[in-house]
């Protein structure tokens, strides 16, 4: 097993951050990107750019750092560390801890969230390294993943009959999907669609418009994001924002009018987006529908993502559960205070002060 060291990325590495992250063993994740780091820097986090290296490979990981009064700093390796094998994670974290100690950074806990499929064996590796399971934070810790490497005809055959029928019916009925420009008007239209969908279903919380504007613009300006609209009677009926990051595509945001007349329009949006991303200079080989119920609750109508799960698993018939969030305790006393009340109080105070979500 390789021995790891950890350091902060150089200025040159930061300038080429996305290329380095997407060269990681697992291909990186959009939540480790330069665009996402830029957004989080405006919303209470201090981004740090970490290189974890051995003689065999270097893994580049975004760390989100937040100061907590009286306790010190929380480090969140969002969707990381990205290692070649899960067995490499414990030694990688020991290297990160040495860096924290050497730099005297007053970090009381290190939260990780590796894109590793959840199995009893994986959980045991993390437990044996002294980590504690903590509630998941990201919507795609359970998600539907589609292998997009087949050519279009075979890819279509790999979908469920429900998705195939919906796409073909929308095509027959003349539904047109348009990739739209990154304008303030289109951003606000997309946000209104999302807000309307959430108000109708009441299952999730929508951040403020400015957060999404910065998020969308950051990815679009780097050639990593695009909006698609479907119009009905002169109005936008369906909207989607999709991301291409390395060889992975993601359906990040979506919204639609509740009352609309054409069946299959939402399915066709996804089909067009997937095939567009397959035609890029760096074509995607996987598409993440970004959030479903866990596999064991996919058919549970009480789950907040039940409806989304039905739609998304019509493209990819199975759900992938990732291992989610785990904490490495660096200061036992401070972490105990964090567990007892610190996290709850910190989240409440931050939301009251800023009107924004803590994470």
Image (cartoon, rainbow, N blue to C red):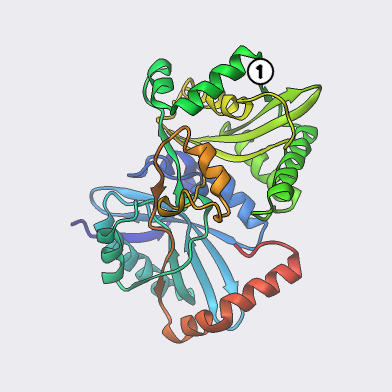
Please name whichever residue, 278 or 270, is drawn nearer the observer in this view of the structure: 270
Q: Nearer the viewer, residue 31 or 326?
A: 326
Task: Tally the numbered discs.
Answer: 1
Say if 302 sits above or below 236 in the image: below
* Quadrant of res 134: bottom left
Q: Quadrant of residue 258?
A: top right
In the displayed image of the protein, which residue is found farthest to the left? 1
Relative depth, front residue between 247 and 57: 247
Give the position of the N terminus as an image quadrant: bottom left
> In the picture provided, is 344 more to the left or to the right than 300?
right
Q: Secondary structure at mark 1?
A: loop
Q: Which is more toward the observer, 136 or 297?
A: 297
The residue sitting at 42% across, 40% down in the picture is 22
Q: Is residue 165 visible?
A: yes
The answer to whether residue 10 is seen in the rendering is no
Q: Quadrant of the C terminus?
A: bottom right
Q: Determine whether 306 is above or below 326 in the image.
A: above
Q: Tell me if residue 307 comes above or below residue 231 in the rendering.
A: below
Asked if residue 354 lies left or right of residue 171, the reply is right
**Residue at position x 78%, y 39% from top?**
188
Image coordinates for residue 239, horizontal then vertical, percent: 68, 33
**What residue would you read off at disc 1?**
175
Q: Position of residue 175 (x, y in %)?
A: 66, 18
Query: What residue sits 60% from the left and 12% below the top?
Result: 172
Give percent across and percent down for residue 26.
Answer: 35, 44
């Amino acid at each position: 097993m390789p021995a790891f060291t950890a350091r902060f990325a150089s200025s040159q590495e930061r300038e080429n951050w996305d290329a380095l992250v997407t060269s990681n063993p697992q291909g990186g994740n959009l939540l480790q990107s330069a665009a996402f780091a830029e957004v989080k820097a405006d919303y209470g986090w201090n981004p740090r750019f970490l290189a974890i290296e051995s003689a065999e490979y270097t893994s580049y990981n975004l760390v989100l750092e937040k100061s907590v009064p009286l306790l010190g700093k929380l480090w969140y390796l969002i969707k990381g560390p990205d290692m070649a094998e899960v067995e490499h994670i414990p030694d990688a974290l020991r290297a990160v801890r040495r860096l924290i100690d050497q730099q005297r950074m007053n970090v009381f806990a290190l939260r990780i969230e590796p894109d590793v499929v959840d199995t009893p064996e994986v959980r045991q590796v993390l437990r044996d390294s002294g980590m504690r399971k903590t509630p998941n934070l990201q919507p795609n810790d359970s998600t539907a993943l589609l292998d997009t490497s087949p050519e279009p005809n075979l890819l279509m055959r790999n979908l469920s009959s429900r998705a195939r029928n919906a796409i073909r019916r929308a095509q027959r009925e003349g539904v047109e999907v348009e990739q739209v420009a990154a304008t303030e008007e289109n951003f606000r239209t997309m946000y209104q669609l999302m807000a309307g969908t959430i108000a109708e279903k009441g299952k999730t919380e929508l951040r403020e418009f400015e957060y999404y504007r910065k998020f969308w613009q950051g990815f679009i300006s780097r050639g990593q994001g695009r909006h698609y609209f479907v119009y009905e009677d002169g109005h936008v009926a369906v909207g989607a924002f999709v991301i291409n990051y390395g060889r992975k595509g993601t359906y990040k945001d979506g919204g639609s009018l509740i009352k609309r007349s054409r069946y299959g329009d939402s399915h066709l949006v996804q089909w067009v987006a997937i095939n567009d991303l397959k035609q890029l200079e760096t074509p995607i080989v996987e598409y993440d529908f970004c959030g479903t119920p866990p596999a064991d609750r996919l058919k549970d109508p009480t789950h907040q993502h039940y409806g989304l799960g039905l739609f998304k698993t019509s493209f990819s018939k199975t759900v992938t559960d990732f291992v989610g969030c785990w904490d490495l305790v660096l200061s036992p006393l401070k972490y105990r205070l964090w567990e007892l009340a610190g996290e709850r109080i910190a989240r409440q105070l931050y939301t009251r002060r800023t009107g924004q979500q803590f994470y």
